[in-house]
Image (cartoon, rainbow, N blue to C red):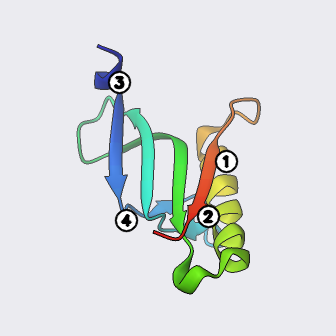
Amino acid sequence: MIVDNYTLWSHKSITYDHKLTCTPDYLISTKSELGKIILGLPLLVVVEAKQNNFIEGWGQCLAELIAAQKMNQNETQPVYGIVTDG
C-alpha cells in the first residue's frame, strides 16, 4: 500500500545546519529505512500561523521548506508547504 511509504510527524525538529533548524507543526516524510523514529525525506510542511499572523507564518514555512529541500539533497524534487490558522 502506498500509505506505508510515508510517515506523519507532529512537532518533529528538522535540521540542515545551524541556521536552518526548525520545528514544523506537522510534517509528512518518506518512511526511513532506519526505523520509525528516524525522519525520512521531508515532502510536506504544515505551519500554524500563530495569532493569525500569516506574514510570520509564511516566513517560518519558507525557512522550513528550504531546510527540507536541502535535506532532500535534490533541488528538483518539489517540497510543499501550507500555513493555516488552525
Under mark 1, the amino acid is Lys
Q: CA distance from mark 2 to mark 4?
A: 18 Å
Percent from the top left, x then y, of residue 59? 72, 71
User: Are dots 3 and 1 in contact, CB under 8 Å?
Assistant: no
Percent from the top left, x then y, of residue 10? 34, 59
- Judge the density around disc 3: few (<14), some (14-19), many (≥20) Cα neighbours within 10 Å: few
Which of discs 4 and 1 lies nearer the camera? The answer is 4
| Residue that numbered label 1 is attached to | 70
- Left or right, 59 with reference to 16: right
34 or 4, which lies in front? Answer: 4
Percent from the top left, x then y, of residue 44? 54, 44
- Judge the density around disc 2: few (<14), some (14-19), many (≥20) Cα neighbours within 10 Å: few
Does label 1 or label 2 sit earlier along the sequence?
A: 2
| Residue that numbered label 3 is attached to | 5
58 or 74, which lies in front? Answer: 58
4 or 70, which lies in front? Answer: 4
